[in-house]
Amino acid sequence: MTTPPKSEEQERKVTGKIHVRGEITVEPSEEEKLLREATSNEQQTKDNESKWIARATLGLVTLYASLTWWLGCSTRNMVNYSHDQLVYSQRPWVGPELGETVITLRENDLQVQWDIHFRNFGSSPALKVKMHTHLFAPAERPDFVQIEQKIATLDVSQDGEFNIFNGQSAPNRGFSSARYDVETKEAIKAETFKLVLGGKIVYSDEFGEKDHMTTFCVIYVPSRDAHPESWITCPVKDIAN
């Protein structure tokens, strides 16, 4: 004998099963909404504060790094400046000590003689000093551009090297290799022809950083009336480094 199927209502009554279809939506109360909004605002405020603190920290770190770098550069520059000032004040300075008669036109043999003293005006010895003096041929219009180039490239190796202590002088005397004829001598005395004397000094110091060079150039001025022979500077750039 077959038992007929039970209806859903009968099955519910017998088994206690309940079938629910659809979704259940629970709306929060106003208090819960306000609480959630306050919590969200508080969290956003904390996030903003965290971002601001992170940015401020990064800015301070960057500022500190920049300040440290600047202080390091300033300290290094001060050390270099102090060292340069010490070297500048204590190094040797060799230059010509030009008297009244640097160049003399000798009457007896029609030669030109020069007499120059090179003095160390600095505070420490000038080492391995080498110098060379050159008398340029008399000319009506000397080419001072060419003369300046010639002086800068004078070969000082042909003369021996020596040391000049601070305050000490070293004489440098020479004669022209040529003997000028009477007409040339008279032209020089009348300043129709000009005599130019140039020189170059190279030396080092105990600091050993670099070699130094001094150049000079003078033009002979003949005696007039009661004035003895003298000189004026050439229109060239003298070097003293």
Image (cartoon, rainbow, N blue to C red):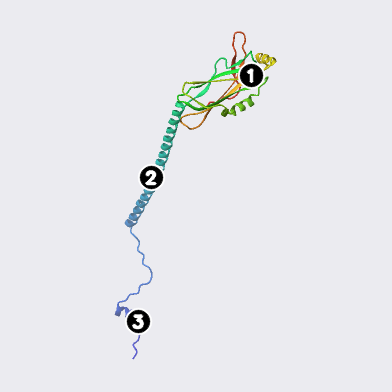
Q: Which mark is residue 57?
A: 2
Would you identify the image quadrant in which residue 176 lies? top right
In the rendered structure, which disc, 3 or 1, sits on the residue that comes first in sequence?
A: 3
The amino acid pointed to by label 3 is Ser
Q: Residue 57, position in %: x, y? A: 38, 45
What residue is disc 1 on? 195
Secondary structure at numbered mark 3: loop
Distance, label 1 to label 2, CA atoms, is: 75 Å
In the rendered structure, which disc, 1 or 2, sits on the residue that comes first in sequence?
A: 2
The amino acid pointed to by label 1 is Leu
Mark nearer the viewer, 3 or 1: 1
User: From what the image shows, is residue 222 above or below residue 165?
Assistant: above
The crowd level at tag 2 (other Cα within 10 Å; few <14, some 14-19, many 20+) is few
- Count of marks, rendered view: 3
Would you identify the image quadrant in which residue 147 lies? top right
Question: Which residue is situated farthest in the top direction here?
Answer: 226
Q: Residue at x 33, y 55 (%)?
A: 35
What residue is disc 3 on? 7
Question: Which residue is situated farthest in the bottom direction here?
Answer: 1
Secondary structure at numbered mark 2: helix
Q: Residue at x 39, y 41 (%)?
A: 64
Q: Are marks 1 and 2 in contact (CB under 8 Å)?
A: no
Q: Residue at x 41, y 41 (%)?
A: 65
User: From what the image shows, is residue 23 above or below residue 190?
Assistant: below
